[in-house]
Amino acid sequence: MGALLTLGLLAALLASGSALRCEECFAFATACSGPVLPCDPGEGACVSGVGHYTLGEGRTLSVAVRSCLEPSSCSQRHFSLTFRPGVAMRMNFTCCHQDGCNTGVVELPSVSSTTNGRSCPSCFVEGADHCDHMTPLPCTGEEDHCFEFTGTITAGNASLTKSSAGCAAPGACRKRVGVTKYARGVFDTLTQAVCYPAPRDEL
Ligand SMILES: *[C@@H]1O[C@H](CO)[C@@H](O)[C@H](O)[C@H]1NC(C)=O
Ligand SMILES: *[C@@H]1O[C@H](CO)[C@@H](O)[C@H](O)[C@H]1NC(C)=O
C-alpha cells in the first residue's frame, strides 16, 4: 500500500515535472496576458501570436494569443496580405520550447507603402466563396506575390469567412488548402489557396 502510494506520487510528480508550461491568454486586442499553465501531453511548444486586420472604413480587428501548441503546428509564420488599398492583414507567430517562454512581445510585420513595380488582381468579399470582380492592385514593399485565398479564419468565438485576392509577402505562400492551427482556438481553414510571383507592370 505504502509502496503503491509512493509509486503513484512519484508518477504524478514525474508527469507534472515533464509537462511544458506556457502562458495562456486570448484577446481581441494588440496584446494579452494570462496564467502560466501546464500543457497537455503532445503539446511540446509554447506559441505567442498577434494578428491585425484593417477592414476599411476605419474598422480594424486585432487578435493576440498565447498558448501551448503541438510542435508540428509550430513555425515562425509571419505574413502580410493586402486586398485593396486600406484593406489588409498582418500576422506573426513565434514558438519556443521552455517553461513560460511565450511571454514576450511579438512584432507585427511592417508593410511599406512604396509601390514595387508589380501588381495583382484583387478582391475582398466577406461571407462569400468566390470573387465576382477583380481590380488591379499595385503591390507595395515586400509584397511581391499574388494570392487567391478562400476560407474562414476563426479566432476564439469570432470567425471571418472571405474570398480574397491581392498582394502578399512570400511567407503567405506557405498557406495550403485545409486547416492550419496557429494556436489553441485560432485556425485558418482554406478551401482555395493560390500563390504565384506577381508580374511586373509593363512600362
Ligand atoms: C515576428 O516576431 C518576432 C518576435 O517578436 C520578431 O523577432 C520577428 O522579427 C517578427 N517578424 C516580423 C516579420 O515582424
Ligand atoms: C466573444 O468573446 C469576447 C471576449 O471573450 C466577448 O467580448 C464577445 O462578446 C464574444 N462575442 C460573442 C458573439 O459571443
Image (cartoon, rainbow, N blue to C red):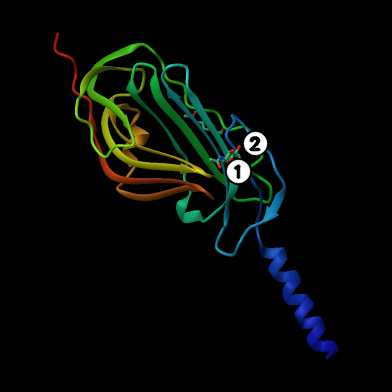
Q: Is residue 47 left or right of residue 193?
A: right
Q: Which kind of residue does numbered mark 2 sit on?
A: Cys
Quarter of the picture holding the N terminus: bottom right
Q: Position of residue 59 (x, y in %)?
A: 47, 22
Q: Position of residue 62 (x, y in %)?
A: 53, 30
At x 67%, y 64%, the residue is 18
Badge 2 vs badge 1, beta-carbon distance below 8 Å = yes
Vertical placement of residue 53 versus 7, above or below: above
Farthest residue, direction bottom: 1
2 or 1: tag closer to the N-terminus: 2
At x 36%, y 11%, the residue is 114
Q: Nearer the viewer, residue 118 or 183?
A: 183
- List the residue tagged with mark 1: 66
Q: Is mark 2 within 8 Å of ligand 2?
A: no
Mark sitting on residue 155: none
- List the residue tagged with mark 2: 32
Q: How many marks?
A: 2
Q: CA distance from mark 2 to mark 1?
A: 8 Å
Q: Quadrant of residue 170?
A: top left
Callout 1 crowding tier (Cα within 10 Å): few <14, some 14–19, many ≥20 = many
Q: Which kind of residue does numbered mark 1 sit on?
A: Arg
Vertical placement of residue 138 versus 98, above or below: above
Vertical placement of residue 155 versus 113, above or below: below
Q: Position of residue 196 (x, y in %)?
A: 22, 33
At x 18%, y 23%, the residue is 199
**In terms of secondary structure, where does tag 1 sit?**
strand
Callout 2 crowding tier (Cα within 10 Å): few <14, some 14–19, many ≥20 = many
Q: Nearer the viewer, residue 174 or 181?
A: 181
Q: Is residue 32 left or right of residue 200?
A: right
